[in-house]
Image (spheres, rainbow, N blue to C red):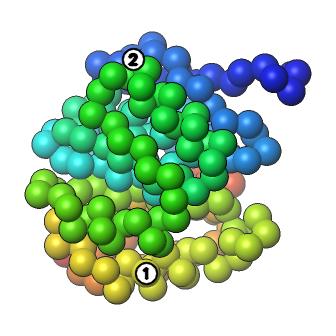
Amino acid sequence: MSRNEKIYTIIESGKFKGKKLLLPSLTSTRSTKSIVKNCVFNVLRYILEDKVFIECFGGSGVMAALALSNNALKAYVIELDKDAYKIAYKNALSLNSNLEVLQGDCFELLDTLLKRQDKDIILYFDPPFHIRYGFEKIYEKLCAFLEKIDLTRVKNIIFEHSSKIEICLNIKEFHKNKVKKFGNTTLSFYEKI
């Protein structure tokens, strides 16, 4: 693949099914596998309506776009990497839908974003896997961060993470109620108790 060749993924379900979305370079992000995306939305599809979906460490914003495609009311992407943010922003424009892309650190932006919402929320976290330099303790840091912020409007939390690690069993009043493994990738689903 040439350096300037664009990489795409296709929305596989919902009202935007068949729509192409740009992906950032494979050196800056790790794209979520189709089987993982399908699992997330097979679980969420019937509870997304009238909910706000927030994708942290969002890369291209594909998961947020899929949430909108499957009837989420609104979706947000938070992405720190400037190049990935630009791709997510282009994807949001191409959908001409209720997708907002924020450039910045999830740890700095999420608490304020949660406080601005008046609808129920689903949080999706897909940080760089712990094998990437500087992210060795990312899951512990995220669990500790979520313990400190107001999660009143949050109804579900999902982590996409390396299968090599276990992440927290409980976060405040949320309990890990489902785990799905796909090779090196695992999804951990949390629901309010």
- Judged by depth in the image, the label closer to the viewer, 1 or 2, is 1
The reply, left or right, for residue 15 in relation to residue 162 is left
Q: Nearer the viewer, residue 187 or 59?
A: 59
Identity of the residue drawn at 48% across and 28% down: 91
- Residue 29, image x and y in percent? 68, 47
- Secondary structure of the residue carrying numbered label 2: loop
The reply, left or right, for residue 183 in relation to residue 175 is right
- Residue 109, image x and y in percent? 40, 66
Identity of the residue drawn at 29% across and 27% down: 97
Any mark on residue 193, and which?
none
Could you give the CA–CA distance between mark 1 and mark 2, rounded to whole angstroms?
35 Å
Please identify the quarter of the rendering in which residue 192 is found.
bottom left
Crowding at mark 1 (Cα within 10 Å: few <14, some 14-19, many 20+):
some
Q: In this view, does 161 lie above or below 31?
A: below
Residue 58 visible here: yes
Q: Which amino acid does label 1 sit on?
A: Phe
Rendered-image quadrant of the C terminus = bottom left
Q: Earlier in the sequence, mark 1 or mark 2?
A: 2
The reply, left or right, for residue 107 in relation to residue 71 is right
Q: Which amino acid does label 2 sit on?
A: Lys
The reply, left or right, for residue 112 in relation to residue 3 is left
Give the residue at the far top of this rendering.
18
Q: Which of 105 and 133 is in front in this view?
A: 105
Mark 2 highlights which residue?
A: 17
Residue 183 visible here: no
- Residue 107, image x and y in percent? 47, 72
Q: In this view, does 111 lie above or below 95?
A: below
Mark 1 highlights which residue?
A: 145
- Secondary structure of the residue carrying numbered label 1: helix
